[in-house]
Image (cartoon, rainbow, N blue to C red):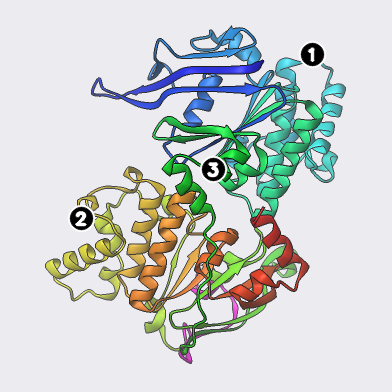
Amino acid sequence: MSLLQISHLSVFFANKKDKSFQAVKDVSLKIEKGKILGIVGETGSGKSVTALSILGLLPYPKAYHSKESSIIFQNQELINLDNETFRKIRGNQISFIFQEPMSSLNPLHKIGKQIAESIKMHQKLSDTEIRKRTIELLQAVKIPSPEQKMNAYPFELSGGQRQRVMIAMAIANNPQILIADEPTTALDVTIQEQIIDLLLELKQKLNMSIIFISHNLRLVHRIADNIAVMYQGKVVEYGSSQKIFEKPRHNYTKKLISSNLLLNSQNKIENDIILKAQNIRVSFPQQKNLWGRVMKELKAVDNVSFKLRQGETLGIVGESGSGKTTLALAAVNLLPHGGEIYIKNNSLFKKHEKFSKDIQIVFQDPYNSLNPRMNVREIIGEGLSVYQKHLSKTEREQKIRQILAEVELKPDVLDKYPHEFSGGQRQRIALARTLILKPKIIFLDEPTSALDVTIQAQIVELLKKLQKKHQLSYIFISHDMHAVRAMSHQIMVMQNGQVVESGPAEQIFNAPQQIYTQQLIKASLI
């Protein structure tokens, strides 16, 4: 018997012109007791809207359902349920883990207080009992030193720890169903594996059902008993995890699986060395005395050296805090650092500032790195106003349109703003802004981590195409080992600010020498 039954669910959103957009189209699903249902699909497929409908968390009345829509939980119809009854269900019988814990947790309150709040709402316990229960929950989600961590604020925790806090809040009242909406998207592969293992352990211990939502079919296959594949608001394929992977029927499911199997490494490059970094060091002060003298410092990057050939991609991998991004920011002179960076034996910033446009960076989150007040034409053309002031208005427009075509965007986007685009389109705009200066080297800092797997594959293929056309050299920074393997000729593995292993991509993936590298690869290929 099903614990929760979704039947003919349709969700519409009204707009200002008295028209409506249908986000979910006639979806029927069932959640069985003690089982995990995986819902997979790209952004806009309707998976999160379906999940939010279960707990009535959509922006009603702007959002509304068809007359045929039905969600039955323990013989109770949840569609159009009154708020008072819903409050008894939310966080008690059905809980929700949201995608971004930093946005979901209150930055002004300690985590102990936030967990206690979810307990107080549904259980009549004394303050002593609530404190004891909070510590038990932190222990259950494997937070170290729980009594100390109770007094920490969200910003004092790592991404993985924040997600564990969200899980602790979600299981505080022993729910029958846990909805996990993209709970591992922004996490390193090793942390992703830990969160998956934790959810499986809690499911077994609490005998609860889980709805696991993700755009990553590999992760869904790892955790789910059954999988529903959603595309453009519809469930296009449904079945057991094993059946979906072994015999996918729908073309979109096949596309998702092939996107997850992007494992081909690049061939060896023998071109001249274009970039050389020697003994790069970056430290951050952690403690100062009364006179401002640094008494204790954190070595974020500790004497890192590497070489990059023309037309080559160096993949830099490691967990959050390993020093990957700090190294990139130092290399493009956005952070004070020790050591030297050379482009073709010329010191990049100390003697030859004219070379600074030859080395550019594309950031992880294009939404935050693109100015929301500038349209696409202004964003892409901004670099020209600094380095090519002599261009006429016509010449400038021609260059902008040419580079827009290279990143496979149409000219009609020029007058639009960043919020009007998808994540993949914004990343193409960020890439165009970089390419218009015709750099020799581009640092790509997690350029695919925030994207759906199908869009990731498109961006990887675009980057490889542009590299071949312009003989570009890339520093590709990521925790996504699939994307790194697809892009890289050479790989450098970082841990705690140091290089623990480096070499040709095939060598690193097929015969890793260090235990840390082996753990990264194992976690990524599960």
Q: Is residue 21 left or right of residue 293?
A: left
- Depth check: 283 or 85 in front? 85
Q: Amino acid at mark 3?
A: Lys
Q: Residue at x 35, y 44 (%)?
A: 419
Image x and y of residue 178, in percent: 66, 27
Residue 476 shows in the view: yes
Q: Which mark is residue 124?
A: 1
Residue 183 shows in the view: no
Q: Is residue 331 left or right of residue 116?
A: left
- Quarter placement of the N terminus: top right
Tell me the magenta residue range: 330-350
Image x and y of residue 470, in percent: 34, 77
Q: Whole-Å distance between the Cαs marked 2 and 3?
A: 41 Å
Q: Whole-Å distance between the Cαs marked 1 and 3?
A: 50 Å
Residue 49 higher or lower than 254, as above or below: above
Q: Amino acid at mark 2?
A: Pro
